[in-house]
Image (spheres, rainbow, N blue to C red):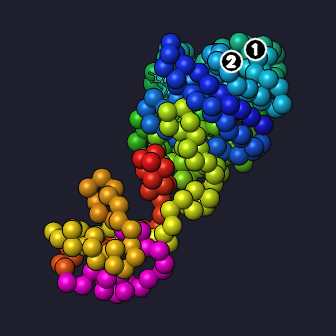
């Protein structure tokens, strides 16, 4: 559906995208993860034909990116693209006109998009009277008015509270069920874990790792991760090493990769001789993989 091959882009002499390649299959949610400045927005702007790459190739539905492929893409940008004093319906009407929809099709699309984002009962409410979560959902409806093949959702839940975030996740899952292909950018690793079929980790304009969560998990040779709290960290690291556990710091937490499944008592036995204040077991999460891949 979307194919990016060897894309490079520099501003003045500063390289922002460095031989970037990725592919998105029809009907999947692809998560592009990266810190601030990694190059996510630059990539999106090139896909949307708003910015010219220095080299490389981008095709969507086998067509090279051009003014005419804009029709295939719906983008919900980081900053809501909405007219605050207009109602939900008026906003959508405006964008349907921009895309050249007329008559019955226009009315149908406005109605369908309001329903798709669960805002049918707010059709005549001005945007400024909607909650932040509702405005974010309307921003997505705007991206869908012209029935695009690919929806690009740029940090769709940034700034939302947890309830609004759950609603947005539900909406994104419904979009996928309706057959939409989605490119999602996010800083939130749990969001990517919940939603994405495949994930690409972007750093300094390069994809450092890519795959499903199960594929990415193979980057860490551990069955699970054990985090401990103790005043005797040096001793704990030495004892962990003796048992074949690799240690890592996640923030200030001291954690160990367990190469094989162990009973809790076997894990505790490894740290015999020191005072353990707490011990917690977690599966290998995207957070651990992200840190491993981006800190190399
Ligand atoms: N028009 C521009 N001129 C010069 N430098 C730019 C321009 N646009 C972006 N950059 C730089 O390119 C790099 C990548 O920016 P980009 O916005 O693509 O990153 P991002 O991954 O989207 O970050 P964020 O998560 O903060 O949105 C940054 O260092 C940024 O300062």
Looking at the rendered structure, the number of numbered marks drawn on it comes to 2
Q: Is residue 36 magenta?
A: no
Considering depth in this image, is 119 or 137 the residue closer to the camera? 137
Residue designated by label 2: 49
Specify start and end residues of the magenta stretch as a single range.
Answer: 256-273
Q: Which residue is drawn at 63% across and 51% down?
A: 211
Taking the image as shown, residue 269 lies to the left or right of residue 163, namely: left
Residue designated by label 1: 67
Q: Is residue 259 magenta?
A: yes
Tell me, yes or no, if residue 281 can be seen here. no
Tell me the crowding category of disc 2: few under 14, some 14 to 19, or many 20 or more residues within 10 angstroms, Cα based: some
Label 1 or label 2, whichever comes before in sequence order = 2
Q: Residue at x 64, y 18 (%)?
A: 54
Query: Is residue 212 depicted above or below 58 in this figure?
Result: below
Considering depth in this image, is 196 or 204 the residue closer to the camera? 204
> Which of the 4 image quarters holds residue 52?
top right
> Which of the 4 image quarters holds residue 128?
top left
Tell me, yes or no, if residue 204 can be seen here. yes
Residue 25 at x, y = what percent?
A: 75, 43
Q: Do the residues labelled 1 and 2 touch (CB within 8 Å)?
A: yes
Taking the image as shown, residue 235 lies to the left or right of residue 84, namely: left
Query: Is residue 59 depicted above or below 68 in this figure?
Result: below
Q: In the orientation shown, which residue stands out farthest toward the left?
A: 231
Query: Is residue 164 depicted above or below 220 in this figure?
Result: above
Q: What element carries label 1?
A: helix
Residue 229 at x, y = what percent?
A: 23, 68
Q: What element carries label 2?
A: loop
Q: Residue at x 41, y 35 (%)?
A: 159
Tell me the crowding category of disc 1: few under 14, some 14 to 19, or many 20 or more residues within 10 angstroms, Cα based: few
Residue 259 at x, y = what percent?
A: 47, 74
Label 1, label 2: how many angstroms apart (C-alpha)?
7 Å
Q: If the image is split into quadrants, where does the N terminus sit? A: top right
């Amino acid at each position: 559906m979307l194919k990016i091959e060897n894309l490079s882009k520099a501003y003045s002499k500063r390289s922002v995208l460095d031989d970037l390649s990725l592919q998105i299959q029809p009907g999947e949610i692809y998560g592009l993860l990266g810190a601030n400045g990694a190059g996510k927005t630059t990539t999106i702007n090139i896909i949307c034909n708003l910015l010219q790459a220095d080299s490389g190739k981008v095709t969507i539905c086998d067509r090279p990116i051009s003014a005419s492929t804009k029709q295939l893409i719906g983008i919900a940008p980081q900053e809501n693209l909405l007219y605050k004093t207009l109602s939900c319906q008026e906003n959508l009407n405006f964008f349907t006109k921009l895309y050249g929809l007329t008559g019955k099709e226009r009315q149908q699309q406005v109605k369908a998009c309001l329903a798709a984002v669960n805002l049918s009962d707010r059709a005549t409410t001005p945007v400024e009277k909607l909650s932040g979560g509702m405005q974010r959902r309307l921003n997505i409806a705007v991206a869908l008015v012209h029935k695009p093949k690919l929806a690009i959702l740029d940090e769709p839940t940034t700034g939302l509270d947890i309830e609004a975030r759950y609603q947005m996740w539900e909406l994104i899952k419904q979009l996928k069920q309706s057959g939409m292909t989605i490119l999602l950018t996010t800083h939130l690793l749990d969001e990517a874990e919940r939603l994405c079929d495949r994930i690409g980790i972007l750093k300094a304009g390069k994809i450092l790792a890519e795959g499903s969560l199960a594929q990415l998990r193979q980057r860490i040779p551990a069955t699970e991760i054990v985090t401990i709290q103790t005043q005797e960290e040096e001793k704990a690291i030495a004892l962990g090493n003796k048992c074949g556990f690799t240690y890592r710091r996640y923030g200030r937490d001291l954690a160990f990769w367990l190469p094989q499944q162990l009973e809790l008592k076997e894990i505790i036995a490894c740290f015999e001789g020191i005072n353990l204040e707490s011990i917690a077991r977690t599966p290998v999460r995207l957070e651990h993989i992200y840190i491993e891949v981006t800190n190399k």
